Image: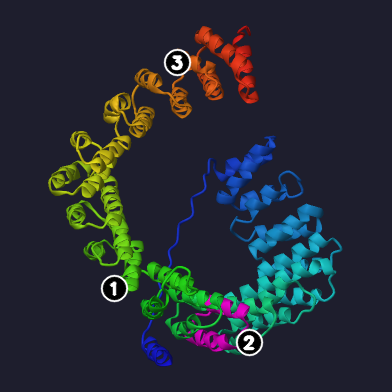
Amino acid sequence: MKTKIYVLIAALLSAWAGAPAADSTPAPTPLVTKSADQLIRVLQSDANRKAKADACRELAVVGNSQAVPVLVGLLANEELSHMARYALETIPGDSVNPALRSELTKLQGRQLVGVIGSLGVRRDPAAVKPLAALLKNTDPQIAQAAARALGSIGTTGAASAISAALGKTAPPNRLAFCEGLFRCAETLAANGKTRDAIALYDRLRGLAEVPNSVRAGALRGSIVVRGKNGDWLLRESLGTSDSILFDAAIRAALEMPRPQVTEMLAAKLPQLWPEHKIVVIQALGSRGDFKALPPLYVEANHGPKSIRLAAIRAIAATGHSLSVKVLVELLDDLTVQVESIEDPEHEIMHAVQDGLAGIPGREADTAALDFLKSPQANRRLVGIDLVGRRRMTVALPGLLLAATDANPKVRASALQRVGKLGTAAEVAALIDILLRTSDAQDFDGLATALTDICIRTGTPASVTAPIIKAFASATPVQKAALLSVLGALGGDKALVAVRGALTDPNPEVHAAALRALTAWPEIAAAPDLLQIARTTTSSAERDLAFVGFVRLVRESGATADEKLRQLSQAATLASSPSEKMLVLAGLGDIPSGASLRVVTPYLSDPAVVEEAGAVAVRISEKLDPKFSDEIGVALNQVLKSAKSPPVLEAARKRMAQLKLPVQ
C-alpha cells in the first residue's frame, strides 16, 4: 500500500490546475414618470403621502441640487423622512452632504438616526468630526448609528474616533462599535491601506468579552489582509482548541488561493482532532488545488469512517482530472475487498463511486469504460453503474455485451442501464439477446429494457413489427416476455398479435397474452377483456379481465355517456364486493343522473352500501338541481341504509341545499 501511495503522490505533484472565470448580471433600470422639476412641485404641493413618497422614489433617480432643500425640509416629517433620505442618498454633487450634516444638531430620535445612516451611505469624510461627537450620546440608537456610519465612511480618522470611544462606551453599544471598526478595516484594506486595516483587526482580535462573531471576524481579517505575511497566524490558529477561532482560520484559508496554504492545511491534518480534521478536509476539497490530493488519499485509506468519507468527497470536490486517478486507485482496492452490501466497506465504496460519477471530463468517462471492460465481475458492476449515472450513450455497445455476461448480476444491471440510455438502434440487439437467452430470470429485465426504450423514445410502432416477427422462432417463455412488451406499447398490429396468442395451446403464452391485454394502454382492448370476463370458465382469468376492463374504461378518453354504457355492462358481471366497488369507483367519476340511477341499486346491497352511499353523495354534489328527483331518491336511500356519519351528514346537507324532503 505505501509504495502505491508514494507512486501516486509523485504523479499528482507533477500536474497543474486552472480556474474558471466569473459572470455578472446587469441590474434593471428604474422607472421614472416625471421630470425633476415636476417631482419637486409635487413635494411642495398638498399632495397625499403616497404621491410624495413616489416623488421621492423617482428623485432618487433623477434628483439634482435643486431638489436638495425641498427634500431636507422633509427630514423632520415622520411619514416622509425615510423616503426623503432615500432620494438624498443618491443625488450627486456637493450640496447634499453639508445639508445632511446641518441636520445633525436639529433632529432627534429616529429622524436623527436616519440622517446619521445617510451620511454613512454617502461616505462623507467631513462628517467624521460631528459623528464622533455623537458616539458619546446617551441614546444607544444614536451612538450605535454613529459608529456604523463612521465605519461606512472608513477613513483613518473615522477608525480613530471609534477606537478611542470603544473602551468608554456602554456595553450595549460595543457590538455596533466593533461593527464600525470592521467596516473601517474593510474599506482601508480595499483602498490599499493594509497596515491600518491590520491594526484595526488586531485591536478587535485583542478585545475581551466580545461576541464570537467579533472574535472570528477579527481573526479572519487579520489573516487575509496580511496575505502571505499572515501564514504564521494561520498556522498558529490551525493549532487552537477554540472551535470558533479554528473555523475562522479555515474561512480565511478558503480566501487564500496560494498553494502554500494548501500545503499548510495538509501538513496540519495528521495533528488535528477528528472534528477539526473533517473541517480541514472539506476546506481542501473546496480549494480545488490538486496538491491536496496526496494527503486526502492518505486520509481516505484509513481511520474512522467519517473521516474517510469526508476525504473521498473532498477528492471529488477538487474537480481536477487527477481526482479521477485517486478515486480509481481507491476503487481498485475496494472492488476486491467488498463482496456484498453488508460489507462494512460498502459505504466507502459507494462514496467513491458517487465521486467518480460526478466528476466531468474525458478522464472520468475513460475510467468508467475501463471498469466496464474489466475481467472482474465486481468491477464490471461498478462500470455499469458509472456509465449509467454519467449518461454515457457511447457505452451502449459495452452495456449490450454485458447484458450477455456470465454473471447474472452483471446482466441484470446492464439491461437496466440499456433501458435508461438506449435508443431505437438498440431494440434489434435486445430482441436478439432475448431470443438467445434461456435463463428465466433475464426475461423480465429484457422486457423492461425494451419497454423503457420504446416508451421513452416514442417508437412503439417501429418496434412492433420486429417483435411480432420474433414470435415465429421464440420459445413459450420468450413469447411471454415479448407479449409483456406489446402489452405496454399497444397499437393495432400488436393487439392483433396478442389476440392470436390468446388461442395459443401453451398455457404460459396464453396467460402472458391475457396479462398483456389487462395492461393495454388503449381502450381498443376493452371489448376483448369484456368478452373474456363473460365467457371464460376460469375464475382467475375472469377476475383479471374484469379488473383490466374497468381500468381501461376509467382511464380512457371516452365520453361520459360511453363510459357509463361500458361500466353498466361491467355492473351486470360484478359479483364480488371488490368488483362492485371497482364499478362504483368508476361511476363516481361520472356526475350524471344516469350514473346515479346505476348506483342506486347498490344502496340495498349490504356488502357495498357504505361505498355506494359515498359515491351517491359525491355524484349528487356535482349534479345540477334539475336532477333533484334522482337525487332525492338516491339520498333518501342513503339515509335509510348507510351507517357512516360523514356520508349521512353530507347526504342531509345536500338535501337541505336542494330543499328535498326526507322520507
Q: Is residue 202 above or below residue 7?
A: above
User: What's the residue at 70%, 35% (across, down)?
Assistant: 46
Q: Dividing the picture into quarters, in which one does residue 102 lie?
A: bottom right
Mark sitting on residue 542: none
- Callout 1: helix, strand or loop? helix
Label 2 sits on residue = 233
- Whichever of callouts 1 and 2 sits on the residue coming sooner in the sequence is 2
- Whichever of callouts 3 and 1 sits on the residue coming sooner in the sequence is 1
Q: Residues within 10 Å of mark 1 (few under 14, many from 20)?
A: few
| Residue 194 image position (x, y, % from top left) | 61, 82
Q: Residues within 10 Å of mark 2 (few under 14, many from 20)?
A: some
Which amino acid type is marked by label 1? Thr
| Residue 587 image position (x, y, % from top left) | 44, 22
Q: Is residue 318 above or below residue 13?
A: above
Label 3 sits on residue = 598
Is 419 colored magenta in this rendering?
no
Q: Nearer the viewer, mark 3 or mark 1?
A: 3
C-alpha separation, residue under disc 3 versus residue under disc 1: 65 Å
Q: Nearer the viewer, residue 37 or 168?
A: 168
Q: Is residue 40 left or right of residue 142?
A: left
C-alpha separation, residue under disc 3 versus residue under disc 2: 85 Å
Is 269 colored magenta in this rendering?
yes
- Callout 3: helix, strand or loop? helix
Q: Dividing the picture into quarters, in which one does residue 354 lie?
A: bottom left
Mark sitting on residue 366: 1
Q: Dividing the picture into quarters, in which one does residue 523 lie?
A: top left
Does the rendering let one see residue 208? yes
Which amino acid type is marked by label 2? Leu
Q: Is residue 89 above or below residue 315?
A: above
Q: What residue range appears in magenta?
A: 255-283
Q: Nearer the viewer, mark 1 or mark 2?
A: 1
